[in-house]
Image (cartoon, grey):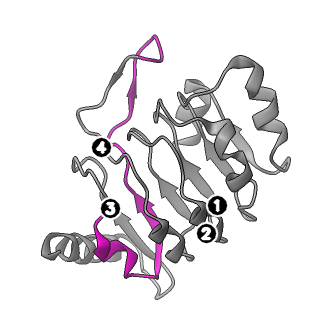
């Protein structure tokens, strides 16, 4: 628990030196720490607006299934507690081992950016009912998740036209700039 508190404090101070942080904005970057689960201390800070639990450096090599992920976390399960972070605007959980999303993800009513890419066993079609309930979602990154070519149109049509669904490596790279 102390490690996470230190990381949060460090990131807050680090971010503060680059730009001011208000009470409503707290960025937490736990990318690339080889985590197997999200520490409970994260769920206790309701002011988090940006949470990165992915890889510290996403690198794609052709073919898509080959990925250098030595900087990745190994999270295979998201707790229902994730729904407590209702101020989240950005949630990055790329390059993990998720197979499903908790129902409580629908409580992330301020979520604008969700990166689920490179969770190879995450059946995105099975998660659509939850994801469609995110009212402010602007960007959904789902490169290299479990889906077929035939399901791509179903996935795209499930969201409002204002929601950008990122399905390819070039789109992912462009959106990450």
Which label's residue is closer to the chain start, 2 or 4?
4
Q: CA distance from mark 2 to mark 3?
A: 17 Å
Q: Quadrant of residue 53?
A: bottom left
Q: Residue furthest top?
A: 63
Q: Mark 1 highlights which residue?
A: 112
Q: Report if residue 177 is visible in the image.
A: no
Q: Is residue 55 above or below residue 37?
A: above
Specify the farthest residue to the left.
2
Q: Secondary structure at mark 1?
A: loop
- Whether residue 59 is in magenta: the answer is yes
- Of badges 2 and 1, the one in the foreground is 2
Q: Residue at x 47, y 30 (%)?
A: 120
Magenta residues?
A: 38-65
Q: Earlier in the sequence, mark 1 or mark 3?
A: 3
Label 1 vs 4, first from the N-terminus: 4
- Residue closer to the observer: 84 or 163: 84
Separation of residues labelled 1 and 3 (CA atoms):
21 Å
Residue 66 coordinates in the image, percent (x, y): 38, 16
The residue wearing badge 4 is: 74
Determine whether 51 is above or below 16 in the image. Answer: above
| Precedes in sequence: disc 2 or disc 3 | 3
Residue at image mark 3: 38
Vertical placement of 162 versus 147: above or below?
A: below
Label at residue 108: 2
Q: Are marks 1 and 4 in contact (CB under 8 Å)?
A: no
């Amino acid at each position: 628990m102390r490690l996470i508190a230190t990381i949060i404090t460090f990131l807050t101070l680090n971010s503060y030196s680059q730009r001011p942080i208000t009470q409503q904005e707290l960025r937490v970057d736990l990318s690339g720490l080889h985590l197997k689960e999200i520490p409970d201390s994260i769920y206790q800070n309701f002011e988090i607006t940006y949470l990165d639990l992915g890889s510290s450096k996403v690198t794609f090599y052709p073919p898509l299934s080959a990925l250098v992920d030595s900087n990745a976390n190994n999270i295979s399960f998201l707790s229902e507690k994730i729904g407590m972070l209702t101020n989240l605007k950005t949630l990055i959980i790329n390059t993990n081992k998720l197979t499903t999303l908790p129902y409580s993800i629908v409580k992330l009513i301020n979520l604008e950016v969700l990166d689920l890419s490179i969770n190879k066993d995450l059946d995105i079609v099975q998660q659509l009912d939850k994801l469609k309930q995110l009212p402010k979602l602007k960007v959904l990154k789902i490169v290299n998740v479990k889906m077929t070519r035939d399901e791509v149109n179903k996935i795209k049509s499930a969201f409002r036209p204002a929601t950008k669904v990122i399905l390819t490596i070039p789109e992912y790279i462009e959106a990450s700039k």
